[in-house]
Amino acid sequence: METDQGKSATRFARSVVEAEASGRILGERPDGFVFSEPRGVFVTLNRHPGVELRGCIGYPYPVMPLAKAIEESARSACHDPRFPDLSPDELSGIVVEVTVLTAPEVIRSSGPADLLESIRVGRDGLMLDLMGYRGLLLPQVPVELGWDAREFLEALSMKAGLPRRAWEDPRATVSRFEGEVFSETEPYGEVVRRSIA
């Protein structure tokens, strides 16, 4: 995705968040081919300063046009069930981040050691599926928290509501994806492409 498109995506996500938190009507979606193409996306709201999570919701699979996926994700991030609903007076204290994803691909491995070797922290986001449970962590998360590949997989297992070592279960499916991250530098500030690694 071009940087200008990433900026448009992030500004659009901000406008959705503002409309949702304030009860206002949303303006027009961005147009152009990239926004009409189905893509997976996550919208993250972080308290500023710092990176304290305030909400993060998205679609890992390319099930709808990017503009609609951003709109739905941004709206839902305001109501992330882990937090109270976002209020209008919080808008000036959060930064909006948009992560546009590649389609998840199952990692084929011969066992836990091989799986560990195949994961690259700073490039890969991961999704785990096991017995109806699913967890997903974006590629920037292990970098921000200083995790290695094992810690990443353990956290992913717990995110799915499973024991820490569930990723080692032979029935578990681990998929990887990559993400382009665009974020405000401060509330209502400049939008930049974030380097993950």
Image (tube, rainbow, N blue to C red):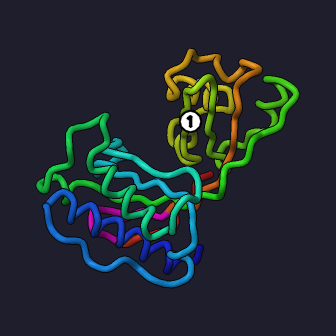
Callout 1 secondary element: loop
Q: Outermost residue toward the right?
A: 110
112 left or right, relative to 194: right
Which span of residues is magenta-colored?
Answer: 182-189
Residue appearing at x 33%, y 50% in the figure: 77
64 left or right, relative to 188: right
Front residue of 90 and 87: 87
Q: What residue does disc 1 label?
A: 146
Q: Is residue 171 above or below residue 21?
A: above
Residue appearing at x 31%, y 69% in the figure: 189
Residue appearing at x 57%, y 30% in the figure: 156
Report if residue 18 lies within the magenta region: no
Q: Is residue 112 above or below residue 45?
A: above
The x, y position of residue 147, in whole percent, is: 59, 33
**Label 1 neighbourhood size at 10 Å, few (<14), some (14-19), many (20+)?**
few
Q: Is residue 150 above or below residue 47?
A: above
Front residue of 93 and 43: 43
Mark 1: amino acid: Gly
